[in-house]
Every structure is written in C-alpha cells, then in structure tokens.
Image: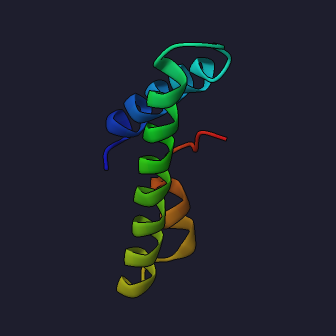
C-alpha cells in the first residue's frame, strides 16, 4: 500500500468517526459497517504479514487508523 492510499483511507476513517456523533439517520450505520470492514482488513493484513515473515514494524507502518 502506498503512502497516498494510506492517507486516503485515514481521511475516510476520520470522516466516519464524526458520523458516530449523529443521533439519527443512516450515517452511524454506514460508519459501523465500514469500521467492521476495516477491522477485518487489519486482522487479515496482520495475519498475512506474520505468515509471510514480515517484520512487525513493517506491518505497523502499513496498517490504517482504526475507527475507535
């Protein structure tokens, strides 16, 4: 993943974090579903990196910011 893609994903996650402050509507539901998808992607990246023998520092650099 390039630095640009990582920055784009982090920007989308920042917008989704703001959506959890909305009381009603579709925004919190969409933000939750996107957060679950991002967490699954992060777990897959970690497990794949571990299986491939990639250094933990490299894996951390490639991970996106999480929704929490």
In this picture, is 5 found above or below 61?
A: above
Image location (x, y in percent) of residue 7: 43, 32
Rendered location of residue 55, percent (x, y):
50, 77
Residue positioned 51% across, 55% down in the render: 61
Specify whether 15 is left or right of 53: right
57, 21: nearer the viewer: 21
Whole-percent x and y of residue 36?
48, 49
Camera-side residue: 23 or 66?
23
Q: Residue at x 49, y 29 (%)?
A: 29
Give the camera-side residue of 57 and 32: 32
Tell me which corner region of the image, top left, top right, bottom left or bottom right, holds residue 50. Answer: bottom left
**Residue at the spot 46% in from the left edge and 19% down from the top edge:** 26
Q: How many marks?
A: 0
Residue at 57% x, 67% y: name it: 57
| Protein image colouring | rainbow
Q: Is residue 24 above or below residue 12?
A: above
Q: Position of residue 53 (x, y in %)?
A: 41, 86
Q: Quadrant of the C terminus?
A: top right
**Residue 41 vs residue 20: left or right?**
left
Image side of residue 11 versus residue 52, left or right: right
Q: Is residue 22 above or below residue 40?
A: above
């Amino acid at each position: 993943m390039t630095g640009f893609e990582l920055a784009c994903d982090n920007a989308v996650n920042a917008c989704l974090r703001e959506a959890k402050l909305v009381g009603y509507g579709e925004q919190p539901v969409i933000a939750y579903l996107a957060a679950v998808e991002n967490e699954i992607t992060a777990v897959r990246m970690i497990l794949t990196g571990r299986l491939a023998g990639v250094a933990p520092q490299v894996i951390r650099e490639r991970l996106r910011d999480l929704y929490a």
